[in-house]
Image (tube, grey):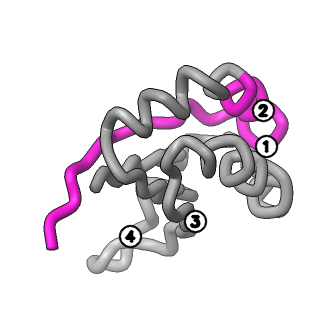
Amino acid sequence: MILVTVMYPVAGSTKFDLDYYQKTHIPLVKERWGAHGLKQAQIVKGLGKADGSGAEYQVMALLTFGSLDDFKAAGKAHGREIFADIPNFTDSQALVQINEVFG
C-alpha cells in the first residue's frame, strides 16, 4: 500500500478555505481517483507541536492507494483537473510525499 501525504505549510498570510476543501475538493478527489485505486482519503488539520509551538502544516491530506502504479494512473487520468482546483481553496504551495505503508 502507498500513502500519499499532501501537506499545506503554514506560511505567513496564506489562505486556506477548509470548508471548500472538505466539501468540494476532497469529494472531487474521491470521485475521480476512486476508480484508479484510491482506497481512502483523510484530512487532518495541524494544531501544534508537542513542545507547544505552532503546527508546520495547516492541513494534510492522507491518500491511500493500493500501489504506486495506482497513484500514477490516477494522476495521469485526472491529475490536471485535481491540481487546477487547488487555487480555489489555497494559495499555499503543497508538498507531496509518497510513503510505503507497513503493517
The answer to whether mark 3 and mark 4 are in CB contact below 8 A is: no
- In depth, the one of 67 and 13 nearer the eye is 67
Q: Earlier in the sequence, mark 3 or mark 2?
A: 3
Mark 3: secondary structure: strand
Residue at 52 percent across and 64 percent down: it is 40
Callout 2 secondary element: loop
Lower position in the chain sequence, tag 4 or tag 1 = 4
Residue 26 falls within the magenta-colored stretch: no
Where does label 1 land, which residue? 89
As drawn, is 61 to the left or to the right of 27? Answer: left
**Residue 43, numbered label:** 3
Q: Nearer the viewer, mark 4 or mark 1?
A: 1
Of tags 3 and 4, which is closer to the observer?
3
Q: Earlier in the sequence, mark 2 or mark 4?
A: 4
Q: Is residue 74 left or right of residue 27?
A: left
Q: Secondary structure at mark 4?
A: loop
Asked whether 86 falls inside the magenta stretch, the response is yes
Q: Which label is found at residue 85?
A: 2
Instruction: Tell me whether circle 2 and circle 4 mark residues in contact (CB < 8 Å).
Output: no
Kindly report which numbered mark, 1 or 3, lies closer to the viewer in this rendering: 3
N-terminal-most mark, 3 or 4? 3
Q: Which image quadrant: the C terminus?
A: bottom left
User: Along the line of sight, which residue is nearer the eye, 11 or 72?
Assistant: 72
The residue type indicated by label 3 comes to Ile
Magenta region, residue range: 81-103
